Amino acid sequence: MFRGHRQHAHYWAFALHRIAGLLLALFLPAHFYVLALSIEGAAAMDGFIRWTDAPLVKLAETVLVILLAAHLTGGLRLMALEFIGTRESSKAAVAIGTGIALAVGLMFLLNVT
Amino acid sequence: MSNSIHVSVWRGGEQGQFEAFDVPRQPSQTVLDVVTYIQRNIDPTLSYRFACRVGMCGSCAMTVNGKPRWTCRTHVNKVAGDGTLEISPLRNLKVVKDLACDMTDFFDKMNRAEGKFHPTKSRHDDFDVVLPDDPARKLAAQAIECIGCAVCYSACDVVEWNKDYLGPAALNRAWTLVNDVRDGGNKARLTAVSGDAGCHACHSQQGCVKHCPKNLSPTFSITGLKRATAKAALKGEL
């Protein structure tokens, strides 16, 4: 996947943005299913919420939050490229976007523990 | 520094294989020097292309250790730290033989992107005045030093995925003309670059920017075309 011509920050940013987007799209049906549970009744929803307290589920949630933040900052980077026409600082945009995504994940993790 | 470089060179056409050579190492040796040594001293049937040897003509680009590069300005010391080199033809172009590619598609796409000048005046008219600090002139100046080496074309995944995609060099050329006040072909040009295989197909991976030996930014030019075509479409001009 990371052949010679792909070994640079902008390709990784592109790949991360796409992969995060695909995984979030796969997560959406599960998200809608849980929302539908609340219509079925409080007991079903409460049961599910108790399940999400398990450490492994919390870890998965943290990954989800990081994916969301990564996709958001990746999109902002693209919009900066396309609308502002950033030229020299786009490598910094990759670094800042990745940093923000990881920081958001860390904040989520600190909040839940 | 060892005394020789172990070089694997692509032999054949689309179907072929790598052939190994040992080439004596020299100070300030370029990758083009290595290929030339093989042809002149080991195997005269090796085919490759070069002309100026000083980074002006854009003929000697090849894939060196997996990355597209201009070989005349690529020092062996920079790319063969462990004393090995793998040299193959550029990606995304048909191979004629060994290291020589068929550049027809690449240059045809310059034409398809309307990368040619459409004059608006005759010899009887006065000159246009283009000041160096004119904003459009500055935009053109940032993109105009392209030598047509096809390194960007070879580094681009979108060209690999969509064979009709005009590619970074052709779109970059179109952008220089969009910013040329003397040119009258912008309607045709913006129409030409706004199709499925035009500027909107770019995924901003920026492989072209990363590998351009002249440090140009085709991505910046392509985003300029995206904005210009969007504005023209909103005005109903496309």
Image (cartoon, coloured by chain):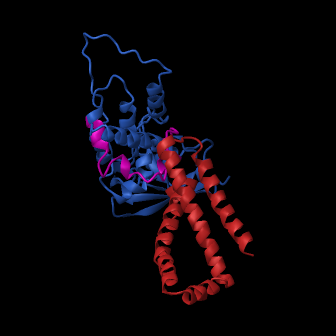
Chain colours: A red, B blue
| Residue B105 lies in the magenta stretch | no
In the drawing, does residue B140 fall left or right of residue B76?
Answer: left
The C terminus of chain B appears in which quarter of the rendering?
A: top left
| Residue B216 lies in the magenta stretch | yes
Q: Which residue is at the front of the view, B151 or A11?
A: A11
Q: Which residue is at the front of the view, A57 or A16?
A: A57
Count of numbered circles in the view: 0
In the drawing, does residue A86 fall left or right of residue B10?
Answer: right
In the drawing, does residue B119 fall left or right of residue B83?
Answer: left
Question: Vertically, is A73 above or below A24?
Answer: above
The residue positioned 64% from the left and 72% from the top of the image is A62
- The image quarter containing residue B6 is bottom right
Q: Is residue B113 visible?
A: no
In the drawing, does residue B191 fall left or right of residue B59?
Answer: left
Q: Which residue is at the front of the view, B174 or B223?
A: B223
Residue B186 in the image: x percent, y percent?
Answer: 30, 32
Q: Is residue B181 visible?
A: yes
Question: Vertically, is B3 above or below B237?
Answer: below
Residue B125 in the image: x percent, y percent?
Answer: 27, 11
| Residues rendered magenta in the picture | B188-217
Q: Which residue is at the front of the view, B144 or A3?
A: B144
Residue B97 in the image: x percent, y percent?
Answer: 34, 54
Residue B5 in the image: x percent, y percent?
Answer: 58, 55
The residue positioned 48% from the left and 86% from the top of the image is A40
The residue positioned 27% from the left and 34% from the top of the image is B187
The residue positioned 57% from the left and 46% from the top of the image is A90
